[in-house]
């Protein structure tokens, strides 16, 4: 016997359906009714003998192409299938596919009502499309039902065969099913399983308002159309999944792109959250808000096509470089084109247009700019204003509001500005709640015990468990709070100390490094900041309140943060975050971790300025640029006066706070094109591009006076001495410039400290305009020294 030939006589379900000219569902139904013979494999798969099928097709009562109906009916059936196939293949949008399918099935059987359900799990179905007398029934769509309540649908799913019900007396109907049918005036129906690639993915209910005996031809026709619907539904679901994957990958790239620069870290996520807040205020639908959020998250994705040398350039851009930057909205629009409709694509292309027509890339004006683009422009600028940048400090909340009002009608749509102002008021109210809880949390933390918690091993200390337990009790009293966490600065780096976690097993540990946001950094530096912003991380979007933890002398030794999930005015989360997509979550988290590692590698943990290594790299680049252009560059070398005495008198924590405060003043004094860095210890460097000695002296004197003024307002006064060297007048290389600025700084110290000296002035330092503040002499007992200073 020929084994191959013998094996080929047995065929699968789909092959049998093709041979008989019917759908696979019809073949399964005929098998269940005993009208076709089949064998089962050990794994339960059906197999058909070719001879049995051929014999059945030639019998008068064979369940195959019945030659008794007229040729006209057969022709109409094939015409229906052909048109249905074309229509279902014409779109990959799931909503369009399902609505078309529901209408097509209603037409195929001349039946008034049709509902299409997706199989969510083994026991539940969700309605995806509903047609009542040919009209889309939006109220029924989205409703979830249990198959235990609808046994006929459950039987169709389990047996993969079509179930027909002639009238309400059918014993297979449950009371729930019978009541539902009566409520809508329905008397008979057909439950049609949707099977694609041997997998049930849904079920279709075709319902009539009269008692009806479905004919064999109607069932076969419905099953054939149902097969096309199942395949179209599967294809649409696959396309949706591909879009989600593509979108997730672009989000990961966007996160990595934003994390290239410390100052733009998290920008995309915050803009997306603000868009949801604004969209809710404008009355947008939930579906539209979710789409706009994704667009907002990707609004700067076009920058991926622009060189880092241009994007991260410290100095002013040339006209050619500026033209490159202006291309990023158009590049971004093309990148996201496969994901969104034309309106949303246009919102990315035009989010840098101005209301008065002076924007780019197309110089649109007024309502010619898409609404989502006008909204995106406002929230994008608000986030930029409210967060720290290399060239300026963050604006306060009142300053941001004033800037929005000032630019309304010129840069911004006035109506969008007004709506966003209302949205920010809702945000401020929730933030006030977080601040109140943060203040209560700070009262529960003993600063002395908190200071003893330095390593993970200290979590075994009784004070750790006692304090964390107290914070968890506080959190339970305020159910809207998700996390309560404390932070401190150890060895120049911000680290986690106490964390309530979402659960007791899901907590951050003592010593875990943390990149502080602007508010946390300000509180740790004992600076008051008035802000109204959203924060985001790998775990969600938050409204945070931060309070200082002070020791007995009033010095800030740590800070505690309370995080509330950010929601809009209707209580919905501001950022859709599906953590179940493991690959997406991993890609996005990995991109952020990698980018943060790059940021931390060039950033000083205590002050947030650039570190010593990055200073040397950038200074070399700036000197090359100045040499090419024939321009000048000045370097300010700053050193805190008597800092060792200061630390001995007031403690290293007070010293860290003073250094962070000085760093913020230095950053605020510098321009976007300048470079501010911590050189080491209590030394700072400020590089002023395109600045001669006279200009550098003016900046240095302003910086010195601001530090003196800020220090005089604190309990622990501290001053600074500044030396200046200029390229190419004083030095021609990087090392020579640093050495000569350092020499000038020591000349200022020899002249009495708290003054400015330029290398070109020789040994004639410039004294301070105001009396110098001399710290108290060194004593043995630190408390006595501190008391003397306070007196």
Image (tube, grey):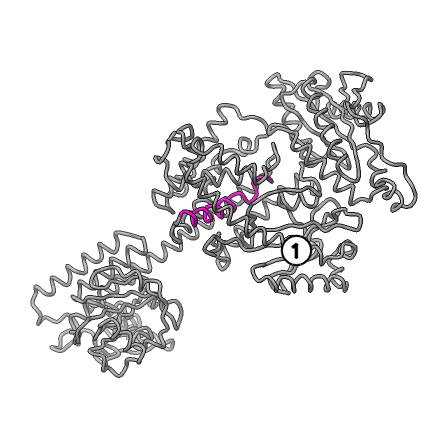
> Quick check: is 149 in the magenta stretch?
no
Task: Reply above or below: 712 against 178.
Answer: above
* Location of residue 138 in the rendering, given as x and y in whole percent from the top left corner: 30, 60
Which residue reaches farthest front?
Answer: 791
Magenta region, main secondary structure: helix
The total of numbered circles placed on residues is 1
* Location of residue 19 in the rendering, given as x and y in whole percent from the top left corner: 21, 68
What segment is highlighted magenta in the picture?
A: 261-282
Is 400 placed left or right of 107 in the picture?
Answer: right
Q: Residue at coordinates 64% horizontally, 52% vertically from top-left?
A: 561
Residue 341 in view in this figure: yes
Q: Quadrant of the N terminus?
A: bottom left
Is 254 placed left or right of 763 in the picture?
Answer: left
Tag 1 secondary structure: strand
For mark 1, does the 10 Å Cα neighbourhood hold few (<14), some (14 to 19), or many (20 or more) residues? many
Q: Nearer the viewer, residue 317 or 404?
A: 404
Residue 495 in view in this figure: no
Which residue reaches farthest bottom?
Answer: 171
* Location of residue 425 in the rendering, given as x and y in whole percent from the top left corner: 51, 47
Task: Reply above or below: 764 against 704.
Answer: above
Q: Nearer the viewer, residue 415 or 341?
A: 415
Is 187 placed left or right of 669 in the picture?
Answer: left
Which image quadrant for residue 18? Answer: bottom left
> Quick check: is 265 in the magenta stretch?
yes
* Location of residue 50 in the rendering, given as x and y in whole percent from the top left corner: 23, 73
What residue is disc 1 on?
485
Which residue reaches farthest right?
Answer: 780
Which image quadrant for residue 145? Answer: bottom left
Q: Quadrant of the C terminus?
A: top right
Q: Nearer the viewer, residue 486 or 420?
A: 420
């Amino acid at each position: 016997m020929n084994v191959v030939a013998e094996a080929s006589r047995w065929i699968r379900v789909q092959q049998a359906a093709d041979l008989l000219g019917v759908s696979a569902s019809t073949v399964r139904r005929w098998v269940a009714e005993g009208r076709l013979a089949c064998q089962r494999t050990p794994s339960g798969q059906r197999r058909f003998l070719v001879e049995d099928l051929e014999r059945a097709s030639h019998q008068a009562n064979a369940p195959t192409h019945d030659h008794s109906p007229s040729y006209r009916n057969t022709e109409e059936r094939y015409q229906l299938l052909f048109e249905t196939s074309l229509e279902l293949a014409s779109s990959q949008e799931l909503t369009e596919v399902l609505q078309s399918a529901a209408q097509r099935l209603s037409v195929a059987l001349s039946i008034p009502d049709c509902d299409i359900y997706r199989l969510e799990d083994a026991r539940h179905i969700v309605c995806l499309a509903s047609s009542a007398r040919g009209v889309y029934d939006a109220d029924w769509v989205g409703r979830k039902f249990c198959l235990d309540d609808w046994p006929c649908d459950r039987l169709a799913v389990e047996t993969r065969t079509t179930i027909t019900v002639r009238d309400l007396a059918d014993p297979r109907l449950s009371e729930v099913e019978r009541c539902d049918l009566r409520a809508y005036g329905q008397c008979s129906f057909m439950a049609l399983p949707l099977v694609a690639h041997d997998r049930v993915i849904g079920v279709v209910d075709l319902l009539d308002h009269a008692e009806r005996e479905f004919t064999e031809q109607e069932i076969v026709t419905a099953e054939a159309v149902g097969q096309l619907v199942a395949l179209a539904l599967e294809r649409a679901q696959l396309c949706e999944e591909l879009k989600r994957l593509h979108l997730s990958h672009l989000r990961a790239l966007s996160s990595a792109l934003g994390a290239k620069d410390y100052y733009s870290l998290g920008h995309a996520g915050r803009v997306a959250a603000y868009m949801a807040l604004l969209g809710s205020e404008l009355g947008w639908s939930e579906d539209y808000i979710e789409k706009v959020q994704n667009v907002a998250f990707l609004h700067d994705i076009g920058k991926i096509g622009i060189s880092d040398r241009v994007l991260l350039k410290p100095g002013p851009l040339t006209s050619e470089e500026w033209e490159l930057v202006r291309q990023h909205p158009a590049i971004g629009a093309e990148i996201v084109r496969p994901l969104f409709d034309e309106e949303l694509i246009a919102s990315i292309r035009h989010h840098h247009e101005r209301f008065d027509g002076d924007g780019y890339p197309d110089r649109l004006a007024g309502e010619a700019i898409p609404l989502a683009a006008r909204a995106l422009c406002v929230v994008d600028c608000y986030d930029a204003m409210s967060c720290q940048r290399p060239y300026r400090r963050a604006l306060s909340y009142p300053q941001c509001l004033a800037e929005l009002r000032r630019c309304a009608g010129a840069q911004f749509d006035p109506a969008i500005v007004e709506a966003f102002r209302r949205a920010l008021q809702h945000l401020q109210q929730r933030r006030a709640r977080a601040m109140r809880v943060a203040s209560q949390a700070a009262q529960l933390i003993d600063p002395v015990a908190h200071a003893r918690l330095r390593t993970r091993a200290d979590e075994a200390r009784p004070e750790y468990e006692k304090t964390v337990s107290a914070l968890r009790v506080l959190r339970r009293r305020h159910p809207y709070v998700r996390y309560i966490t404390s932070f401190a600065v150890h060895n120049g780096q911000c680290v986690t100390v106490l964390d309530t976690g979402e659960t007791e097993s899901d907590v951050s540990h003592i010593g875990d490094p943390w990149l502080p946001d602007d508010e946390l950094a300000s509180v740790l530096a004992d600076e008051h900041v008035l802000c109204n912003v959203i924060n985001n991380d790998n775990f969600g979007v938050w409204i945070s309140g931060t309070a200082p933890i002070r020791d007995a002398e009033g010095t800030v030794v740590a800070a505690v943060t309370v995080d509330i999930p950010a929601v809009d005015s209707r209580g919905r989360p501001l950022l859709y975050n599906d953590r179940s997509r493991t690959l997406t979550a991993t890609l996005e988290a990995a991109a952020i971790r990698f980018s943060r590692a790059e940021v931390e590698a060039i950033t000083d943990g205590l002050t947030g300025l650039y570190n010593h290594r990055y200073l040397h790299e950038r200074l070399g680049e700036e000197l090359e640029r100045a040499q090419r252009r024939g321009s000048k560059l000045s370097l300010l070398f700053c050193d805190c006066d008597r800092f060792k005495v200061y630390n001995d008198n007031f403690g290293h924590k007070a010293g860290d706070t003073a250094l962070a405060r000085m760093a913020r003043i230095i950053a605020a004094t510098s321009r976007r094109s300048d470079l501010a860095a911590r050189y080491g210890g209590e030394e700072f460097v400020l590089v002023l591009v395109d600045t001669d000695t006279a200009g550098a002296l003016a900046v240095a004197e302003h910086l010195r006076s601001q530090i003196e003024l800020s220090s005089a307002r604190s309990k622990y006064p501290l001053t600074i001495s500044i030396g200046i060297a200029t390229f190419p007048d004083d030095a021609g290389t990087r090392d020579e410039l640093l050495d000569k600025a350092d020499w000038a700084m020591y000349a200022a110290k020899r002249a009495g400290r708290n003054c400015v000296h330029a290398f070109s002035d020789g040994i004639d330092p410039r004294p301070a305009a105001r009396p110098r503040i001399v710290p108290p002499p060194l004593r043995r007992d630190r408390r006595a020294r501190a008391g003397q200073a306070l007196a």
